[in-house]
Amino acid sequence: MKDYKHSVSLDVSKCKGCTTCLKRCPTEAIRIRDGHAVISSARCIDCGECIKVCPYKAKKATHDPLSCINDYKYTVALPAPSLYGQFDNMDNIGYIIRGLRDMGFDDVFEVACAAELVSAYTRLYIKRKNIPKPVISSACPAITRLISMNYPMLCENIMPILPPVDIAAHLAREKAKREHPELSDEDIGIFFISPCPAKVSYVKNDFAGERNYIDATISVRDVYFELIDKMKRRQDEPLESTESGMVGIGWASTGGESTAIFNERYLAASGIENCIRVLDQIDNEDITSLDFVELNACSGGCVGGAMTVANPYIAQARLQILKRYLPVSPNRPVSEYIPDEYYDENEVEYNPYNLLSEDRQTALRMMADIESITEGLPKLDCGSCGAPTCMAFAEDIVKGETSADECTVIMRMLFHEYLEQHKEKDKEQEILRKISAIKDGKNQKTNDEG
Amino acid sequence: MKAVSAENWGMLMSEPINFHFDVDGENFSSAGEASVVVKKKLRQLGFPPDVIRRVSIAMYEGEINMVIHANGGDADVTVDDDFITIVLKDTGPGIPDVSLAMQEGYSTARESIRALGFGAGMGLPNMKKYTDSMEIDTTVGVGTTITMKIALNS
């Protein structure tokens, strides 16, 4: 397995080494070492939880800078539908599209339009026989990676069709080439405006393989202020409006993707903890009779991404109003046939990231050691040692990544014992001193009397 | 609480390894937690996905049964060279007719429990289906012990 490039980074100078992110990481990917957080790239799924909870803003999503649009002759912006929910008092998506053009993009291709195609393909796909059910959405990269790490038996349930953003990038590039035959492939820059770091890693790691048509991923947050500025400069109504319908824009929040399968046998969950519980139950075959499962790592769906500006529920309320008078789903595939280039080339494979050892006997011995060390630990899961739980601490000790001295609870106990011993000694000394004082006093008296 | 000392970590375990769980009978929402923990441990030990799933489902069904019928109990999972053995022990009402209980769809669960999505009558049949052997030792009024084995070198 190639090294995974993750896109959550740490500003060491801001990190205080507090345990907030440590406790919230769903895959126990964070440790506090030498006074600051360290992220294990083998375990990180880029869900962005740590970015959202960091009280010192030390965790950041890495993404491409807006300035890289200057590297291309012709640029296309791919706004995620969640971008539309970021602005207050805006009643026409056309303002955003025109704003993006005013920022310097030559064209805008809405991801929401491609999402409608993916919804249509999903409806076709789930009707097939002999496919593993429930079909799990491939849209949230954090969930896909989580499944590859913890749910080996569910890898084949992930829908093999590319997520909307990749299809949007493909279509946008085709369109640019069609409209501007003079341009070469290198001249065209496709820019995804993303609500979340997981999408950044997805692109960086080339998870779409040969089918990666995105050149750069920029954050909704970076675009936000400049876009507001550009939108406010123009008072007149924009000429163009959204080409997406209710379905495409619905993808921005939880349940949007599911309702578009037009079939009630679906489950839609959001928030990483909820998603984990749902996956555990599906893995135990305890939820049956479902056709489709939509899981979003962020609460509320993509509007809850770590690179957005607005509160996810406020963004969701704005989107409801924006899509109110739109047609249901104006973007439809030309035929009932799912094009080959829309299939994901790379099947999701099980990645046993937490394997103790390749050798079973060694692994068993290590596990036995972990169990016996955990037995002696306080089980407070306080995080002071730098590991999220006492069990994780024991694992780190056995793997040789930390030492048992890091347990502050045990150290405090030992320190108290030490102090007690010293108190005893101090008392002895005190008594000896008193005795000698009395003796001295007596001697004094005897001397006086004599 | 005793402090960890360097001596008791390095012990070479040729003995089987055992994971013990108290299954809380009071709490429906926590039912299934032990099977999640076992799954993680088996992944760490590098067992193949299908073995992990079989252990997990058998254990999960057993856990749910103990919560529904027996007010909880003890779950023990032992891993040795040849088998993963799951022992579920409760002091519940016992099973009056084991062969009837083994029939798919047979359930004595109350309506209130069925309403929660449990008690479909697939628990014991699934436990048998996913394991290589299953023994039920039960006495009405005393309790039930179920021992399931999954062979590792088959």
Image: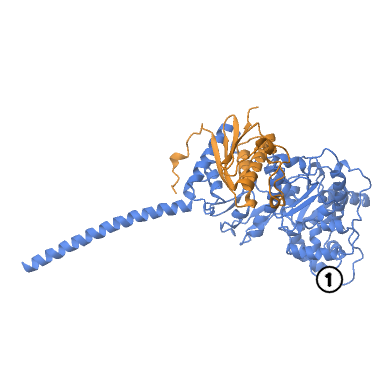
Q: Is residue A427 above or below residue A445?
A: above
Q: Nearer the viewer, residue A167 or B90?
A: B90
At 49% from the left and 45% from the top, the residue drawn is A375
Q: Nearer the viewer, residue B2 or A143?
A: B2
At 52% from the left and 42% from the top, the residue drawn is A371
Name the colour scheme.
Answer: by chain
User: Residue A98, percent across and down?
Assistant: 87, 64
Picture quadrant where residue B153 is located: top right
Q: Is residue A272 above or below residue B93?
A: below
Q: Is residue A162 above or below residue A193?
A: above
**Colour in which chain B is drawn:** orange
User: Residue B31, percent across and down?
Assistant: 63, 48
Q: Which residue is mark 1?
A: A233
Left or right relative to A347: residue B7: left
Picture quadrant where residue B79 is located: top right
Q: Residue furthest left?
A: A450
Quadrant into which the C terminus of chain A falls? bottom left
User: Residue B43, percent across and down?
Assistant: 63, 39
Residue A42 shows in this picture: no
User: Residue A379, percent across and down?
Assistant: 52, 50
Q: Amino acid at mark 1?
A: Arg
Q: Nearer the viewer, residue A189 or A305?
A: A305
Q: Nearer the viewer, residue A361 or B74?
A: B74
Chain that the image shows in blue: A
Left or right relative to A148: residue A424: left
Label 1 Cα crowd, 10 Å radius (few <14 / some 14-19 / many 20+): few
Q: Residue furthest bottom?
A: A235
Q: Secondary structure at mark 1?
A: helix
How many callouts does the rendering have? 1
Left or right relative to B56: residue A110: right
Quadrant into which the N terminus of chain A falls? top right
Chain letter, disc 1 residue? A
